[in-house]
Image: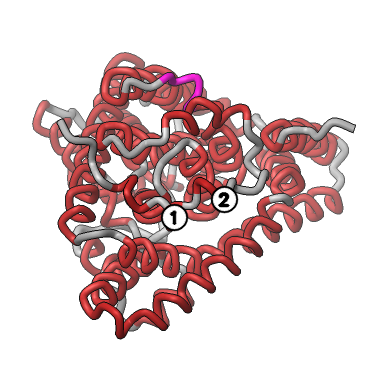
Amino acid sequence: MRKIPFSVQILLGLVLGVALGFLARSADLSWLTSTLHTVGSLFVQLLKLAVPPLVFTAIVVSVVSLRGVANAARLALKTLLWFGATALISVSIGIGLGLLTNPGKGVTLDLGSAAPPKNTGSWTDFLTGIVPTNPVGAFVEGNVLQIVFLALVVGAAALLVGDAAEPFVALNRSLLEIVQKALWWVIRLAPIGTLGLIGNAVASYGWDLLAPLAKFTTAVYVGCAIVLFVVYPLVLVLAGRLNPVRFFAGAWPAIELAFVSRSSVGTMPVTQRSVERLGVPREYASFAVPFGATTKMDGCAAIYPALAAIFVAQVFGVHLGITDYLLIAFVSVVGSAATAGLTGAIVMLTLTLSTLGLPLAGAGLLLAIDPILDMVRTATNVAGQALVPTVVAAREGTLDRAAYESAGRRDLTDPEPAATTRTERPEQLDPVPA
């Protein structure tokens, strides 16, 4: 019997999950809703369980395998620049849609029941979100950005120590292989996890919650769709000279899983595998993808806060001027890292609202539909997290274009060919001479 491709398995899980979710909601089957919730939650927990050791060992091994810190610094700088550039484009689209659609005009809500969310963002969270109070806490809490920081420091130190650090590096290489093998046992369960996650979302929330905020919800989905299917393809073509269809074919399993799991960190292992299958060198992908999973959030930190800030201002009758829109853009491009150690786009929204002087209680108005919005936001986030490493590698001349062209024709769960292991091809990190 012919094998069903992994992306098709996820799609089938999504369709069946929607059907079971509607059944559970329409027939009021609480046991089915509970079962779907348990299946989805267990899958996300299994994914997140592998993230801390995967991120740490992959980055340590990657940094040590680089030929020089200058090369790593250049790649990191270019990655950050592309993160910022695409975020600026995304927030501009969010502001433009907000001005065009006026999502808060004519909306009647009970403002007295609105309350600020429990978690709020601040600029001081930027530093506290990067540097851990203790190394053990970063792993216990699953704070990916702090783990990236620790791994970069340890990897750089091991690189400078030289031969004396080789036993430690060998241990990390061995642990990395073990974690990756165990992780892909979990990844193969993604269709079942998708069924549970999307089924629980439909059963718990349905679509009736969207009625009072239909214009705002539509604007968020349209904004994310423009970034996904217009902006990103243009970046691929103009900056990387790459075929967008091949990119989406290779990255689609990660985008699908992000949509249903609503977790960039939980999707990160699939994102990294997809990026490597697109031809990005593993040493670079193992840095860029974990870093992007905590700071590259075009959906949660650019499109959504821009639209939501305009919505809140209109609902509360506050006029926004040109300076306010510039502040929204600044917060979106620079401030997303301030939410690295926290959870959800609501934190990024409170940071935006507090910077503009808008009432934080406005964020509470959107909590009811946040899970539905978070699906498309996270899918956009993950697509951007896969896009930037691919474009940077293409511009550096390190992208395996043959792998890129064939990514969509190879199943994500197939074993990686031995010839493409990056430890055997360190020369791929050298830029092509001009």
Q: How is the model colour-coded? A: secondary structure
**Left or right: 113, with 21 as reference point:** left
Query: In which quarter of the view is residue 90 placed?
Result: top left
- Crowdedness near tag 2: few (<14), some (14–19) or many (≥20) residues, C-alpha within 10 Å: few
Q: Residue 417 location in percent, x, y? A: 59, 46
* Quadrant (top left/top right/bottom left/bottom right) for the N terminus: top right
Task: Decide which of 19, 423 is in the foreground and name it.
Answer: 423
Instruction: Name the residue carrying label 2.
Output: 418
Which image quarter holds the C terminus? top left
Tell me if residue 245 is in the magenta stretch.
yes
**302 above or below 245?**
below
Residue farthest to the right, as pictured? 1
The circle on residue 424 is 1
| Badge 1 amino acid | Glu
Q: CA distance from mark 1 to mark 2?
A: 9 Å
Q: Is residue 46 left or right of residue 397?
A: right
Q: What residue lies at 29% left-to-right and 37% top-to-bottom?
A: 392
- Residue 61 is inside the magenta segment: no
- Determine the residue positioned at 35% across, 41% down: 389
Q: Amino acid at mark 2?
A: Ala
Which stretch is magenta? Answer: 243-247
